[in-house]
Amino acid sequence: MVSTKRLSARNRPARENGSERRAELLAIAGELFATRGFLATTVRDIADAAGILSGSLYHHFDSKEAMVDEILREFLDDQRQANAKIIEEAEDPRTALTELIKRSYAALRQHPAAIAIFQNEANYLAQFERFDYLPGVADEFEKTWLKVLQEGQKSGVFREDLNAKLTYRFIRDTVWTTVHWFNPSGKLSIKSIADQYINILCDGIVAR
Amino acid sequence: MVSTKRLSARNRPARENGSERRAELLAIAGELFATRGFLATTVRDIADAAGILSGSLYHHFDSKEAMVDEILREFLDDQRQANAKIIEEAEDPRTALTELIKRSYAALRQHPAAIAIFQNEANYLAQFERFDYLPGVADEFEKTWLKVLQEGQKSGVFREDLNAKLTYRFIRDTVWTTVHWFNPSGKLSIKSIADQYINILCDGIVAR
DNA sequence: TAGCCGAACAAGCAAGTGCTTGGTAGAGTG
DNA sequence: CACTCTACCAAGCACTTGCTTGTTCGGCTA
């Protein structure tokens, strides 16, 4: 007879709940994936870094893929929600754009590993069914930014002779790629980087 | 007794000369490394794409690493020479900067695979002695661009309130990352992308 | 105190990895 | 004709990969 007992949070196996140890392991894996790459990181590397044996990882996670999956989903959900809130609250396109940029830079502090993984491995991961959602999310992000840019052009805040799609890509590439060289303990703060970029983007580098 | 016979170009083994077949194999490998990643591409993948068996590759090359090495060196040498020539010939910092940008974009057409590999795998490859030269080259590129930016600031062409190093990174990230989405058979030409970027970089996106 | 459960270990398997070896067909060369 | 050279094949070796299995053990709970 099949048990009808509901699984309480305490009873659920570790691979489905949010135990502390589990989160710790995810963070360790994320950092390795981000710095060495997904393929270059072996389950033995992760286990070593966590001080356990590789087989023990499978008590917490179904597979190596499942780990990246969870890391990416968390970051992407977060970013999506934040973007939506900005669009909703911003009073004009220029504010919306600068807020989107600031928010993206802020994400570098909160999800540095996830951003690096998204940047480096999205292409490779997209070949697996499990990651079918990746192109969709990228598309959604593009739509959000495009709307802001195009509204800004209509209302005359942004130059009309710009190709909005191209402009979006320039911005996106600059902002996200920062994850490859940003050093949290260096001289430059995220805020100062964001401010300088917004400054250049809006007014250019040529002196007047 | 050691032979003193000089190796003529015809006698040299294939792994050291520049036979057509060899160049063909390098191109095939480069494309695979660029699209799938270095680690994700197996020597069997390369051999399959070339219509031979994996072992046969070792008639032409010492190792899989040797293949990327050669691909990267060719591109980097080319780019270094081109940069030097621009610096030498440009009459003012603004021309020098725009020429550097145009040249970088032009490289996307000539060495798309090498650029993608350099972008994606430099970090990973740098751990092997064989690729010790990579950080040095990156440094040299940075110095070249920085000189142009700083001279421009001194002469009053570029705004003085800019952090030159930061500005360089913004430019570099935008230009090189283009390799990830540029489609040679798409609507946008390399030239129009370059022009638009130079335009935004110099004057900003805000309407006046 | 008996039973259960989360967390880990110990061992190993199947598949795949880069690379090596010994050999061969065919074109060219002395 | 004997030879050398290029480009390749066929087979397989040593090793690493992600993952599975069966087991142990301390702590919580009924």
Image (tube, coloured by chain):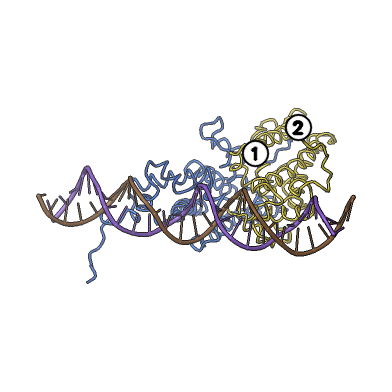
Chain colours: A blue, B yellow, C brown, D purple
Q: Position of residue A51 (x, y in %)?
A: 38, 41
Residue most extreme to the top: B154
Question: Is residue A141 in view from this perspective?
Answer: no
- Residue B207 position within the rendered picture, expressed as x and y whole percent measured from the top left: 69, 47
Residue B2 occupies which quadrant of the picture?
top right
Same chain for labels 2 and 1? Say yes or no.
yes
Task: Return the chain for callout 2.
Answer: B
Marks 2/1 in contact by CB < 8 Å: the verdict is no
Q: Residue at x 61, y 39 (%)?
A: B126
Residue shown at 43%/43% (left/top)?
Answer: A28
* Mark 2, residue position: B152
- Residue at 53% in and 44% down: A36
Q: Amino acid at mark 1?
A: Phe
Q: Nearer the viewer, residue B186 or B131?
A: B131
According to the image, label 1 marks what residue? Answer: B131
- Where residue A114 sits in the image (x, y, percent)? 49, 48
The residue shown at (70%, 55%) is A163
Vertical comparison of A192 with A166: above or below = above
